[in-house]
Amino acid sequence: MQAVLSRIRASESAPPWSTTSAIVFAVVYGVIWIAAQALAVSITGGDLTTPTASGLALGVLITGALSAIVVVQWVQRRAPQDWSHALHLETSHTLPLFVCLLLGIGAAWGIDLIGVLLHLKGDQVVPPTLAILADQSAPAFGWIVAAVAAILGQPIGEELIFRGLLYPSLAARFDHVGSIALTTAIFTVINVLLGGSGVWYALIQPLLMSLVVTALRAHTQSTQMAIVARAMFGLFFVLSALISAHF
């Protein structure tokens, strides 16, 4: 345990942006989410207050794609010669890829088990925005969009902002353990505001997930590994939905 904490506390180069800029991006993520949901509703039908399941999933995918594009374009302007290093998109410095994969899927299962054992999940199998995954009558297009959003869209978009921009800017000002807590707090607040109904997927699950993913980001000093671990949470959602729906 001491070795893990030592790795988490290891210093890394400060990013070429301020903490204020990173926090602004966290807020911008919420704005992108709302805009993406509005666009998805215009494509799939319904309205913004009661979007269709397909619309919710499409909105998540659009949010992830737009967030990734905005972050990469902005960082390329700040560090045109080495923008990927500025975002720490290199591979892990401490753990091999397969270990990060196993930690991600294991943490996703462990957190889900906590929700089941403590009866915190209710009848929710996956986050409300990905509910179409557990719908046996869902159109193939909507299901595929939700699966791609869970495994690729959300992990890339969210991790570039919260673990790529926000965490290293906080770590440059505070100790790393405190930065993990602050990153998780901001991430959780955003999820509470955007996550919809249900205390588990709006508050508790995002909080626990963020603690795990941010700690892994600190340990590996790699946003790429944070994306990998977050993708395993998305894969777990897809697998859970498949098992629940008896596909």
Image: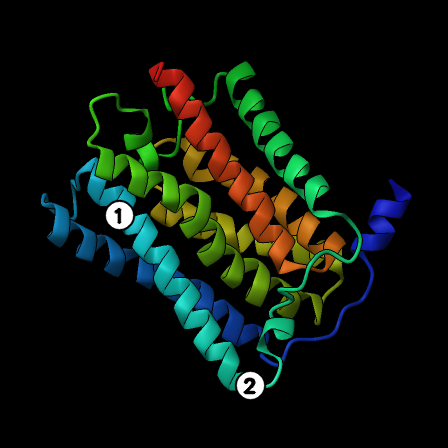
Tell me where residue 74 appears, x and y as whole percent. Answer: 46, 78
Observer-nearest of 95 and 32: 95
Q: Amino acid at mark 2?
A: Pro
Q: Secondary structure at mark 2?
A: loop
Task: Identify which residue is drawn at 51% across, 81% down.
Answer: 76
Please say which color scheme the image uses: rainbow
Picture quadrant of residue 131: top left
Task: Identify which residue is drawn at 28% across, 31% down.
Answer: 132
Observer-nearest of 84 and 128: 84
Q: Mark 2 — residue?
A: 80
Q: Secondary structure at mark 1?
A: helix
Question: In the rendered view, does 172 fall on the left or right side of 121?
Answer: right
Question: In the rendered view, does 164 fall on the left or right side of 90?
Answer: left
The quadrant of the image that shows the N terminus is top right
Q: Mark 1 — residue?
A: 58
Q: Amino acid at mark 1?
A: Leu
Q: Is residue 45 above or below residue 20?
A: above
Q: Is residue 151 above or below residue 105?
A: below
Picture quadrant of residue 118: top right
Mark 1–mark 2 distance (CA, rounded to whole Å): 31 Å
Tell me where residue 179 appears, x and y as whole percent. Answer: 67, 59
Q: Report the disc number at residue 46.
A: none
